[in-house]
Image (tube, rainbow, N blue to C red):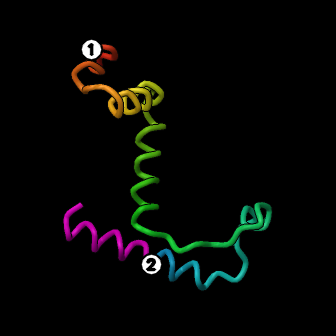
Amino acid sequence: MDEAERVYVENFCAGINTAASKVVIYPAEFYITMTSFEDYTPLDVWSTNCLLAMFLTKDWHQEFLRERLTAIYDRELVDKLLPF
């Protein structure tokens, strides 16, 4: 991401972390799973964005397979095996 976008995401994370630090009683999920809040980071923003993009498509499983195959084989071969 470029510098302006990075600053925006870091400020977004800082806002979430500030708000979370003022919470007295966390949602039930934290108590059920016996976890605590961890600072929200730009990596969390990116990961959430990737997961949403993946699961909001009808062919997420094929895209996942395509990415796994490109780690092993040439992109050209993968495109022939799994055309868009």
The residue carrying mark 2 is: 15
**Residue for point 70% across, 73% down:** 26
Q: What's the CA distance linking mark 1 and mark 2?
A: 45 Å
The residue carrying mark 1 is: 80
* On-image quarter of the N terminus: bottom left
Q: Which residues are magenta?
A: 1-14
Amino acid carrying mark 1 in the image = Lys
| Tag in front: 1 or 2 | 1
**Residue for point 32% across, 30% down:** 70
On the image, the x and y values in percent for residue 49 come to: 41, 51
Would you call the spot at circle 2 few (<14 residues within 10 Å), some (14-19), or many (20 or more)?
few
Asked whether, in this view, residue 45 is left or right of residue 38, the answer is left
On the image, the x and y values in percent for residue 41 come to: 44, 69
Q: Quadrant of residue 34?
A: bottom right
Asked if 36 appears above or below 2 in the picture, the reply is below
On the image, the x and y values in percent for residue 14 come to: 43, 78
